Image (cartoon, rainbow, N blue to C red):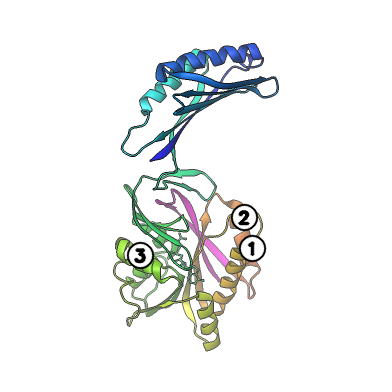
Amino acid sequence: MAAQTILFDFTLDKDKTSDEKQRLEVAKILRNELEHVFPQLELAYSMESPENGYFAVLHENKDTVITCRIFQHGLLTLNVEYFLPDGKDGISFDTMRTVELILRQKFGCDRSKYLPPIKRGGYIDIYMTSSDERIIEYDIDQVVYEARSPFQKIQIMHSKTLGNMLLLDELQNIAESDLIYTETLMCRGVENYEGKEICILGGGDGALLYELLKENPKHVVMLEIDEIVMQACNKYLSVICGDVLEKRKTDQYEIIVGDCVEYLKKFIAEGRKFDYVFGDLTDIPITDAPVGETWDFIRTIFEHSFKVLKPGGKYLTHGNGSTCKVQLRLFEEQLDLLRPKVKYTTTKAFVPSFMEEWLFYQVTFA
Ligand SMILES: C[S@@+](CC[C@H](N)C(=O)[O-])C[C@H]1O[C@@H](n2cnc3c(N)ncnc32)[C@H](O)[C@@H]1O
């Protein structure tokens, strides 16, 4: 059950839309053509002005509503919207693509676009936004798990191509398809974890812990605030986390449930040090200035993490989508502020469930 919104646009010769008479002529062609698909079409409202061009609302049985605008600059937009109950088929792709091609021919234009239905208001949300604010449509067919912890909304969705996906506060975090994310974060094949002491900040999906344990480290401590994230991932994301979230303590690792900042403070007080610290926490916020709660949190994490790193140690973390140049520069500026000074390298990977390339940082003392 969802509202379906189908969008078309056509780029017409400007001469065909520059005055009222011509715009009405274009509107007539449009209506004649639409009547082949919507035989009961009625005009509910229309408006024409030299500044804003032509605007009309049409409907069929008040069920399908079509809005049309003809701008004087040569652009025509058409939005078709109707409600689709569960189990019913909407207007087919072929039908609407044919409408587009016929209209293109009748308008004598060589540029148009037809966007298949955007499904709005359905129980399963299939749209997410990339880090550079593009709409991404997922092939999600099932909500596997949903809960609200004291910290966040937790969902496991099933995608036909990506497998189970973890969403936190409606943002994609990791999916069964994303081994490359974890391998790029840990620089697999480049870093040698054998016999090393490692601290993971966050990482509640368990994937990083699972992959690190395959490299024979001396010990890994993971500081994750949300017990419910771990329970959900243990049950539904074992493809990427194995059984590491089953136990909280073994000879090889310990998972501590709590705020990583508090535990970092404790480690600093105790003089506990690590060869590697992983920031597997919240993403860098998409903002134009490094202000606000999340940026404060990032700065706190940096300051505390470098205090628990051994002299030759490394801080490894994910950055953001590689096209988010402004946010990545702000992130690097925060690193540049650190004392003692640090230096960093970056790696990139195309992460399947993000449907975009992501940047990762490897930071050491300068
Ligand atoms: C699941 S990982 C997400 C990393 C992921 N791979 C991504 O795409 O960004 C983030 C985890 O950090 C945890 N987290 C957030 N703030 C935290 C804090 N202050 N202390 C410990 N864990 C925290 C969240 O509960 C979450 O499980």
The residue at which mark 3 appears reads as 232
Give the quadrant of the N terminus. Answer: top left
* Viewer-nearest residue: 135 or 46: 46
Residue 334 is inside the magenta segment: no
For badge 2, the amino acid type reads Thr
Q: Are marks 3 and 1 in contact (CB under 8 Å)?
A: no
Q: Position of residue 21 (x, y in %)?
A: 64, 11
> Quick one: SS at disc 1?
loop
For badge 3, the amino acid type reads Ala
Q: Nearer the viewer, mark 2 or mark 3?
A: 3
For badge 1, the amino acid type reads Gly
How far is disc 3 from disc 1 in space, using C-alphas? 30 Å
As displayed, is residue 70 above or below residue 85?
A: above
> Quick one: SS at disc 2?
loop
The residue at which mark 2 appears reads as 287
Could you say which quadrant of the image residue 301 lies in? bottom right
**Mark 2 C-beta closer than 8 Å to ligand 1:** no
As displayed, is residue 37 above or below residue 294?
A: above
How far is disc 2 from disc 1 in space, using C-alphas? 9 Å
Question: Which badge, 2 or 3, is on the more N-terminal residue?
Answer: 3
| Tag of residue 353 | none
The residue at which mark 1 appears reads as 292
Give me the residue at 48% from left, 28% from top.
Answer: 65
**Mark 3 C-beta closer than 8 Å to ligand 1:** no
Report the span colored magenta.
Answer: 343-366
As displayed, is residue 49 above or below residue 282?
A: above
